[in-house]
Image: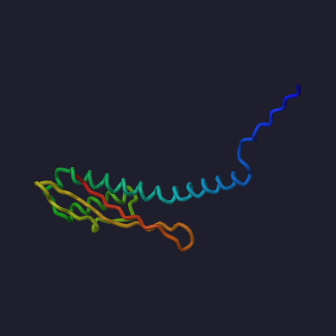
Amino acid sequence: MHYTAIRKQQGLSLSSLLIWSIILVLIAVFGMKLVPAYIEHSAITKNLKAIAKEVELQAGDPNQIRLSFSKRAQIDNIKSISGQDIKINRENGRVVLSAKYTVKIPLISNISLNIDFESMSH
């Protein structure tokens, strides 16, 4: 008795391999464009929290706080906001700093992505 079993082939065809590779390349390109905005957002939040914790700036002038942020922003290469964009409030004797801003990221040709960020020091 001659028994032959036909097994179903498994794997990717060339066309599906090309489609998946295009999808992965697009995800990588979008990721490389989006990641810097989120890194800058975390740097802004870190600087706002550090400034709010500084003892000598708790009773300081708002211009001193803005100047301190501008110096830190220059070191961390923050371009989205400046010291003038920071809102300064006092709650329970503590300084609370916040900033709202939008980052425009060009994607393809005339298509851009606007991301709204809000950073606060608590």
Which residue is painted at 80% across and 36% down in the image? 6
Q: Is residue 101 above or below residue 76?
A: below
Q: How many numbered marks does the figure carry?
A: 0
Which residue is painted at 73% across and 49% down in the image? 13
- Would residue 116 be found to the left or right of residue 8 on screen? left
Q: Position of residue 90 (x, y in %)?
A: 14, 59
Q: Residue furthest top?
A: 1
- Would residue 107 be found to the left or right of residue 8 on screen? left
Which residue is painted at 31% across and 65% down in the image? 100
Q: Residue furthest right?
A: 1
Q: Residue furthest front?
A: 1
Q: Position of residue 47 (x, y in %)?
A: 30, 54
Q: Is residue 2 above or below residue 100?
A: above
Residue 78's quadrant in the figure?
bottom left
Q: Residue furthest left?
A: 93
Front one among 111 and 98 = 111
Which residue is painted at 25% across and 54% down in the image? 121
What's the coloring here?
rainbow
Front one among 6 and 78 = 6
Q: Position of residue 35 (x, y in %)?
A: 47, 55
